[in-house]
Image: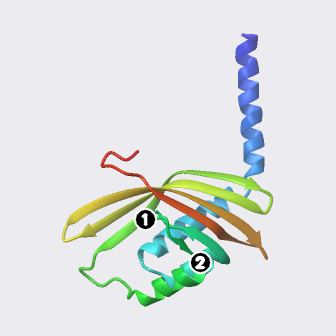
Amino acid sequence: MTRILAVLLLLTFTSAIRAETEPEAPVLTKLLNEFLAGAGRNDATIHERFWADDLIYTTSKGERKDKAAIMKEVRSEAPPKEGDETTVFTAENVRIQQYGETAIVAFRLVGTTEKDGKKTINKYLNTGTFLKRNGQWQAVAWQATMIPGKDKP
């Protein structure tokens, strides 16, 4: 009985410490979800807000990009029209670790694309490093890795 009580106290204590170390988790989760919704619409405003000017982004294809390159791509694409291929992005298994004004946001990105009534689902493991500057969180580093295969976890 003493061991069970000790384990329960340890788990409670560990949870309390974790909750205190990620006080901005709700803000970062909201920012991530707003970004993913905007990315599916090719919303330049949300990209501008999300990415820091000094961003280092490594794509799932192993390419390095900065914010200027991402913004150029976003602005060169027209918004989706009726009947165009559409992709909805969602985040699963979001994990946030905060270290003062720095936070790591890791999650599984799910991209569901629909074209002509057919759905294709791609999954990626994404990790973003965020800094809080002037009261605003922005991603300064990003790594995306495609999960291969049909039965993606």
* Residue farthest along the top direction in this orientation: 1
Query: Looking at the image, which residue is at 59% across and 65% down?
Result: 142
Instruction: State the image coordinates of residue 23 (x, y, percent, origin top left).
Output: 74, 55
Q: For the residue labelled by badge 1, is the local secondary structure a helix, a strand or a loop?
A: strand
Q: Secondary structure at mark 2?
A: loop
- Whether 53 is drawn above or below 63: the answer is below
Q: Earlier in the sequence, mark 2 or mark 1?
A: 2
Picture quadrant of residue 153: top left
Q: Hey, which quadrant is residue 116 in on the image?
A: bottom left
The quadrant in which the N terminus is found is top right
Q: Which label belongs to residue 59? A: none
Dividing the picture into quadrants, the one containing residue 30 is bottom right
Residue at position x 80%, y 58% in the image: 100
Camera-nearest residue between 148 and 133? 148
Q: Residue at x 23, y 80 (%)?
A: 83
Q: Dots 2 and 1: beta carbons under 8 Å?
A: no
Measure the alpha-carbon separation of dots 2 and 1: 21 Å
In this picture, residue 96 sits left or right of residue 134:
left
Whether 49 is drawn above or below 152: the answer is below
Q: Is residue 76 above or below residue 15?
A: below
Instruction: Tell which of 9 and 142 is nearer to you.
Output: 142
Point out which mark residue 66 bears.
2
Pinpoint residue 60: horizontal percent, then vertical percent. Answer: 46, 63
Q: Of the residues shown, which amino acid type is indicated by label 1?
A: Phe
Residue under numbered circle 1? 89
- Neighbor class of circle 2 (other Cα within 10 Å; few <14, some 14-19, many 20+) is some
The residue that appears at 61% across and 75% down in the rendered structure is: 51
Label 2 sits on what residue type? Answer: Asp
